[in-house]
Amino acid sequence: MTASRRSWLTGLSAAAAAALVSACDRIAGDPGVRAGLRSAERLNLGLHRVLFDRRTLAREYPEAAISADFPANGSTNPSDLDYRALAEGGFAAYRLVVDGLVDRPLSLDLAALRALPARSQVTRHDCVEGWSAIARWSGARLAPLLAQAGLKPEARYLVFHCFDTLDPEAGEQGRYYESIDLVDALHPQTLLAYAMNGAPLGIAHGAPVRLRVERQLGYKHAKYVRRIEVVADFSHISGGRGGFWEDRGYEWYAGI
Amino acid sequence: MRLAHVLIAAAVLLLLPSGLQIFNAHPTLYTGETSARERAWLQIGSRERGESLTGYLRLGGREIETTGVLGWSGPAGEREKRAFPAWATLPGYQSLATGRNWHLAAAWLLSLGLGVYLAVGLASGRLAAVLVPTREMLRPRAALADLVGHLTLRFPPAEQGYNLLQRLTYLAVVAVALPLVIISGLAMSPAVHAAAPWTGDLFGGRQSARSAHFLGAVALALFFLLHMVMLVLHQPLRRVRLMTFGRGKDRS
């Protein structure tokens, strides 16, 4: 084979391979195809709800298992002005708003939050990227707080609105938010955590308050929570898929 | 069972590259429950060396330079920091979300395929007849002859059924490797782990399960390559016909 023919063949096969790869990528990334693939997510959620006791606790670990180094992902120091102002005041002016489909909307400061029925648990945090770390989380149990607000019969989801803008280029849709259903909201380990490893929650980990929803991956555990909105449906909120990462293709049910 | 074989093959061909895409999101493997740095045993990454970047694979205490393939790869001028290169991942571009969509859907395909394969195979007695080595095969002389035959690339004809090495390999795949990747995959799910903590304990923690999942996948990838090489080496057309249409008499 002559050198020119060889290089021509190499070029041709490289081009064919590139065309094949880009065709595969087009199919792999097609929104319709991906929506179809995510029917596996509904299957997983349905199966988990049927097979597993809804109140099964995630494993709790001994104090000795706590990780020396707990990574912080997503926003680690929000630059949003309202958040900066709160942080500079030591979160004295912080109010957690609970509204939407509730009988009695609430606005709680940190002292009121700390006075609610609390729980402390040493659990494992599993990031969607693949890493895991263990910490002690202490906070207000969500179920008694929701009982205080009184859920209306049509309430189905809780939407957690956060202070941090994780994607500034996306404008309003770049703000972090998350949502969970009532099964997870009323689970005994679901907390509004204000302390980590015995100290007030640090800014990197979501100060002053973050969600703990054990049994799901890290991105569900919204940090910097400012408002809990109780809704019947979240399709009208931001990208419509129930969370910042969900709007970017991740599963809403992050139990896997 | 032939249909189940197709399902399993299709699932594995989707799971391997989408799994590498997921691996790329955190290209380090550990032992134990958590990802403590001192318990890392495998890492793929890149670092600056003078003006340029180099890719590396660190295994235990040893480090191998892997520029162009692992850690730092892609066409000249468009090189990217990524553990596994674009040609090995699904999708080719970097997207953990898309990789997960494919991986979690294909995992259903695999579970379904393997479930049907094992259920039908066990109920009909076909697995025992076709995959479990016979007593004659296990006699030292016969076993040695089979091994020598493979090493010298002289294989018995396809119509004689599976030989000893084939049976042991296929048995290891359907009874060990595939169940292993499924269980270690489930162990990584926080919801499954809450309901069935034994899935994690079986491996010695979530990060050990993740390591086992990766090693199981590597074993399956090697099996697949060998499986294809053997097919091409020996009576490929006849074997594909047997695989697709069966042996005529006992269609199942």
Image (cartoon, rainbow, N blue to C red):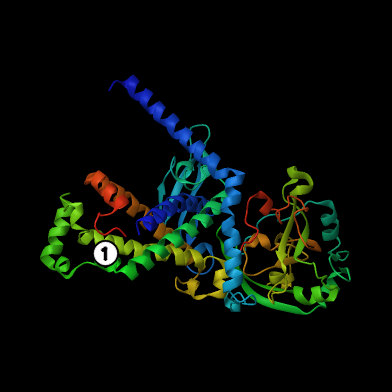
Front residue (pair B167, B159): B159
Q: Considering the image in quadrants, where does the N terminus of chain B appear?
A: bottom left
Image mark 1: chain: B
Left or right side of B160 for B190: right
- Quadrant location of residue A86? bottom right
- Quadrant location of residue A185? bottom right
User: Looking at the picture, how far across and down is residue B119, in whole percent?
Assistant: 38, 68
Find disc 1 in the rendering and name its residue: B131
Is label 1 in a helix, a strand or a loop?
loop
| Residue at 82% over, 55% down | A84
Front residue (pair A168, B5): B5
- Quadrant location of residue A44? bottom right
Left or right side of B219 for B79: right
Q: Of the residues shown, which amino acid type is indicated by label 1?
A: Leu
- Seen in the picture, residue A131 relative to A79 is either above or below; the reply is below
User: In the rendered image, is residue B128 in sight?
Assistant: yes
Front residue (pair A157, B93): A157
Q: How many marks?
A: 1
User: In the rendered image, is residue B25 in sight?
Assistant: no
User: Looking at the picture, how far across and down is residue A170, in whole percent?
Assistant: 74, 44
User: Looking at the picture, how far across and down is residue A144, in whole percent?
Assistant: 79, 77
Front residue (pair B3, B79): B3
Circle 1 packing at 10 Å, graded few (<14), some (14-19), many (20+), is many
Left or right side of A127 for B16: left
Q: Residue furthest front?
A: B249
User: Looking at the picture, how far across and down is residue A32, in whole percent?
Assistant: 61, 45
| Residue at 61% over, 45% down | A31
Q: Residue furthest left?
A: B141
Left or right side of B173 for A154: right
